[in-house]
Image: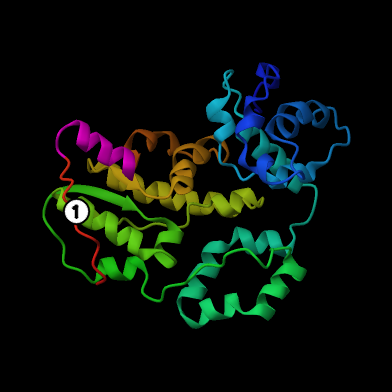
Amino acid sequence: MKPNIDQCIKCSICNAYCPVLKATGLFPGPKLAGPDAERFRRQRKAIPSEWLEYCDYCKICERVCPQNVPIPDLHIRSRLAWKETRKPSYRDWLLGHAYLLQKLGSWPAPVSTWAAGWGFARWLLDRGLGIDRRTPMPSYRRRTFAHWFKSRPRVKGEPVAYFHGCYTNYIQPELGRAIVEVLEKNDFAVQVPPQECCGLPLISNGFLALASGLGKRNIQSLQQTIEKGTDVVFSSPSCGMTLREEYETILDLPGASRLKDHLLDICQFLLQLYEEGRLNPRFNEVRET
């Protein structure tokens, strides 16, 4: 069921806070692209569906809305309905399967990083896929976070699990290393349960069946961890949001609702430790290992 669009009172607070509307005039804002346009979409009247492609699903509009209208949920459901009417483009497939590209890019790194930044390659991405040549490209790492974690000795302490996500694993493993060292500094024994891509890129580009497959495997793995009394922290807000919200509301996956109370953003987790007087704030810089 889609959200009740009549909750919108036209105050335009969502427009005032929307980062995409500030960046480009091609997006009319969350109010017009969401609740306003939905009235026409439900009557099957012509409306520019391409507007929805500009929404980056940051959910700021939902946070500031005084009427609690779930505009991002409305956007993504309308976007998915629109994508069902057309064949996915190669660009959609490529962006949806970003986790595969990151895995492939990690293997020949740093050559892959150089190739991605090569002028001719940037021109091809711009002209062929509509990915602006000025877009910063990822810097792949051959030694992933998962490889680093498996090679290090385990420490004793209170168990906590870490869902690192694709970006940390393949592109920014130093972030994952820092989180592990901070948690171990606070007497936690970090576990990394088996995990797949959260599936958000697939959801955003209309590949719900593939996203559901990844989601089911993640739920099964994380449930086994939670049933042992171990909470799970995440460092990627988009991954955490997908695990906590989209698995239940968009993908309707069995068991998704049981994850919510055991999934914590790493900052939220550390803040709780601080408020309980348990946080050790004396951190050294993370060492390259």
Residue occupying image coordinates x 50% and y 36%: 248
Residue occupying image coordinates x 59% and y 18%: 67
Residue 75 visible in the snapshot: yes
Residues drawn in magenta: 266-278
Residue 81 is situated, as x and y percent measured from the top left of the image, at 73, 41
Q: Report the quarter where the C terminus lies.
A: bottom left
Horizontal placement of 123 versus 262: left or right? right
Residue 100 is situated, as x and y percent measured from the top left of the image, at 53, 67
Give the class, few, some or many, for how many residues have Cα within 10 Å of label 1's Cα (few <14, many ≥20): few
Q: Report the quarter where the N terminus lies.
A: top right
Residue 108 visible in the snapshot: no
* Most common SS among magenta residues: helix
Residue 114 is situated, as x and y percent measured from the top left of the image, at 54, 80
Q: Is residue 288 above or below residue 65?
A: below
Residue named by callout 1: 283
Q: Is residue 72 above or below residue 169?
A: above
Residue occupying image coordinates x 72% and y 68%: 126
Please state which amino acid type lies under the numbered disc 1: Phe
Residue 5 drawn in magenta: no
The kind of secondary structure element at disc 1 is loop
